[in-house]
Image: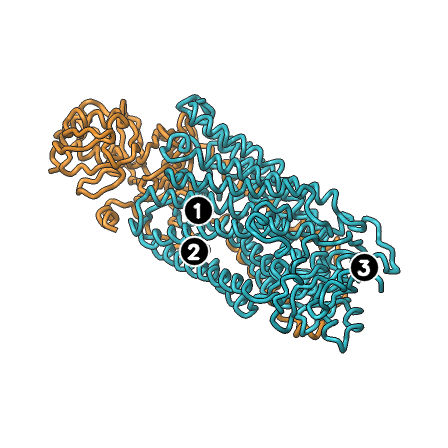
Chain colours: A cyan, B orange
Amino acid sequence: MTSTTAAMDSSPTGERSAPPPSSDGARSDSYLTHDRGFASWIFTLDHKRIGIMYLIGVMTAFLLGGVFALLIRTELFFPGRTLMDAQTYNQLFTLHGAIMVFLVIIPGIPAILGNFVLPMQLGAKDVAFPRLNLTSFHLWVLGALFLVLSMVLSAVDTGWTFYTPYSTTTSTAVIPATFGAFILGFSSIFTGLNFIVTIHKLRPPGMGWYRMPLFLWSLYATAVIQVLATPVLGITLLLLIAERLFQIGIFDPALGGDPVLYQHFFWFYSHPAVYIMIVPAFGVISEIIPVFSRKRIFGYKFIALSSVAIAILGFFVWGHHMFTSGQSILAGTLFSALTFLIAIPTAIKVFNWIATMYKARIHLDTPMLYALAFLWVFTIGGLTGIFLGTMSIDVHLHDTYFVVAHFHYVMMGGSITAFLGGLHYWWPKLFGRRYDEKLARIATGVVFVGLNLTFFPQFILGARGMPRRYYDYLPEFTHLHQLSSVGAFILGAGFVMTTVYLIATLRRPIDAAANPWGASTLEWTLPSPPPYYNFHEAPIVTAGPYDGYEDLVYVEELHGYVRRSEEKQSSGDPGRAIEGGPRSSARESLEPPQAERAGADPARTDGASETSKPEEEA
Amino acid sequence: MITYLLLADALPKSPQSSTFWLPKAGSLSAGQFDWLYDFLTILSIVSVVGIAAAIVYLVVKYRAGSRAANEIADKTPDHNTTLELTWSIIPLFIVMAIFVWGFKGYLDLRTPPKDALEVNVTGQKWNWSFTYSNGMSDNALHVPVNTPVRLVLTSVDVIHSLYIPAFRIKMDAVPGRYTEMWFQSTEAGEYPIFCAEYCGAGHSRMLSRVVVHEPGGYENWLSEQQKKMSSMPLPELGAQLYQKQGCKTCHSIDGSRLVGPSWKGLFGRKETMSDGTVIAVDANYIRESITEPQKRIVSSFAPAMPTYQGKLTDRELTALIEYIKTLK
């Protein structure tokens, strides 16, 4: 076999069995060590490094938002004052919401995992506009600084929704916070734009639309929403700022404005934004389930197109946030009917994921555990959405803890669970290190228990009439609040545990195989961590993203998979067993052979030498 | 904790409910609501349990051995259009039925009978004010049992939302416009009212109660209240206004610190204003603080108080001042 695919170019990344012989030179090809110094990171154009910087930034924000959440839950442990006064509490829940939505979940999966994985899944060297990608990250930092500025001046107390006329009349620092959200909107638009162009223009030969990994379908659908919906939020927040600064009557009835207009504008963005948050999660789950089931995904086209259907329908349902606002009955009816339609593509996905596991061979590693946890929490989140879409039922449940529980099951339970699944799935690729699988499984369990204990009691609270955004509550709600608070601390412990064992891996030598899970999407053909330039030549795709598991063989001492043909030829030579493919002669002469390891070489990429011609686009 | 214990007597309390999920049903629409809610709950539980059972079954049955065994899934079809259509169309019919039921219920909620008794509701930070047909206001909602009641809501500052869990209804009170809601209570008793739209520091204390009177009780209550208010001594009237106009949400009478300064020992006290001047609190300053609250603010307090200009008569303003004088 004389594959020309650059993917098989072996990347020397340190010896596997023994401690690496301080071979910095040998590792220099990895994107992590290609350049050094602070500036080489913050001004990098490399999509992988930008992904890592997003990871650090978003996780810092997640920590902050999480600490706020724990303070909120502590305050609510007893009715009346526990830690803080009402004003501080209101500022905390506002910051918790704003940080988690704008800084964590919206950028979460697309900007971290998407940035890192998308170009590699396309066999590309980078996204289409690397500078725009870097700008997007810098804008994220700038937007985050504005939110911090609001915290320092006089933390905003409007709720993350900034409803008028409260937001135009409160004395807290609304302008820095909304301007921060405005800037973060541009960060999101740039990422979306970049992903759309990259997916259109940089797909490798042989990868038609129906051969794209489902993660890319989901990122594409998300990007369309980001580009089309976010500008509406931007202009709405600018109008809000103009009203506060110049007393122009747009939303404040005292100035002749209409406060309900603000709600329409706001939800025109913020409902599609819910899909910006959850659709990428669908993509991650669609990657994990087939790989850990050793089986092709069931209903590929239905899963792919349902993402698009959700993205489109998501634009026409914003009014379901406003059934009690005085909105006309006709408008409410249309919004309710369209809302129910979204249940269908969502249900299709869940059924297809489950069908994929039929007659499969299921490995319960951490990413798969997170995927299964996702199915549980997301099903609960989705079904309770049906309660809220039903108009007469929503009148009672609107603005109660039922809504809080519902969107935390979807956002926290759905998006964050999928993110953690994806993070564990791609962690060996991101940093070239394996994490402690046993600890990771325990942490998954802790997170799962904490999540359900925190948010399930909130459904009961809400149904019994406990309104949201309450600093104080009637004594009759005490026990359920305490249950929820205990859950929050368990959840927090799960996250701390996860952070500790993941960061601990970075102190260890590089020890991850190119393809630890036996996946057949293109990123796994690269060594772990990938070289700076990803692929030296664009790979040619000859099969679907979930094909060819039978050609991959697990090699115990490698902790990863290699192609069946490679395994045979390398038997008896452990040094070669870890080679995923033929080395380029040039590189071989440069690197000491014992320091080499490489990626496995899934069947789908060795196009040039295969007898089968690359199929045309489906 | 301290403020809670002091206020515990004043807090509304939900009557004991016979069901796990929902508060006691106190209106006609609550009955309508409850069966659909129960249906959705059962549907959800069946779906979640079904899906969870399927996952557990599949994971147990098709769990792979060690990775070294290199097991590959059985060859099964990777798509099946009939199956996809089945699990798309059946849920579609189910959700469309739910939509129609929800729509019908919503139409009922939004269509009050023509002969309904009308009560005007004003939301204000952080107090509800209910104005009855005879012009009298109270901060609790009093209604006769088994009678349709229409509430016409508005707000003088930000958006509030009147929420009565026992009746399963809620409607926003929006400044600059009127919204309406209606209900017909089915059982005499008291039920909590909440503000459901976030409105600032006193949001969680913007509580009230519906008092559903037995037949005849409502009319008696109205005439009694009216008599009382006109003949009451000023400090006593002031004490009533303190309860009913929402003063108590932000001003304590026991010296504890809430959103605004406590009224205990307030009269004659030297206070530092936010601009640094020091004044002794007198009748004129109190009157000014009620009608033009933002003019001079006691330092360390936020300018959070809404104006009561036009909402209180001269007699009522004087009554409040007289009441504050008694709080030594």
Between the C-alphas of marks 2 and 3, the distance is: 53 Å
Kind of residue at disc 1: His
The mark nearer the N terminus, 2 or 3, is 2
Q: Chain of mark 2?
A: A
Quarter holding residue A429: bottom right
Instruction: Reply above or below: A17 against A519.
Output: below
> Do the residues indicated by labels 1 and 2 lie within the same chain of the protein?
yes
> Do residues under tags 1 and 2 come within 8 Å of each other at their CB atoms?
no
Q: Which residue is mark 1?
A: A96
Instruction: Reply above or below: A366 against B208.
Output: below
Q: Secondary structure at mark 3?
A: loop
> Do the residues indicated by labels 2 and 3 lie within the same chain of the protein?
yes
Quarter holding residue B271: top left
**Residue at the spot x=66%, y=53% of the render?**
A117
Between the C-alphas of marks 1 and 2, the distance is: 20 Å
> Do residues under tags 2 and 3 come within 8 Å of each other at their CB atoms?
no
Residue B147 seen in the figure: yes
**Residue A27 screen position, x and y as percent:** 65, 61
Q: Nearer the viewer, residue A437 or A311?
A: A437
Q: Which residue is mark 3?
A: A606
**Discs 3/1, front:** 3
Q: Residues within 10 Å of mark 3 (few under 14, many from 20)?
A: many
**Residue A312 screen position, x and y as percent:** 65, 40
Kind of residue at disc 3: Asp
Kind of residue at disc 2: Pro
What label sits on residue A457 in the rendered view?
Answer: 2
**Residue at the spot x=60%, y=43% of the render?**
A134
Q: Residues within 10 Å of mark 2 (few under 14, many from 20)?
A: many
Q: Nearer the viewer, residue B259 or A338?
A: B259
Q: Secondary structure at mark 1?
A: helix
**Residue B13 screen position, x and y as percent:** 30, 48
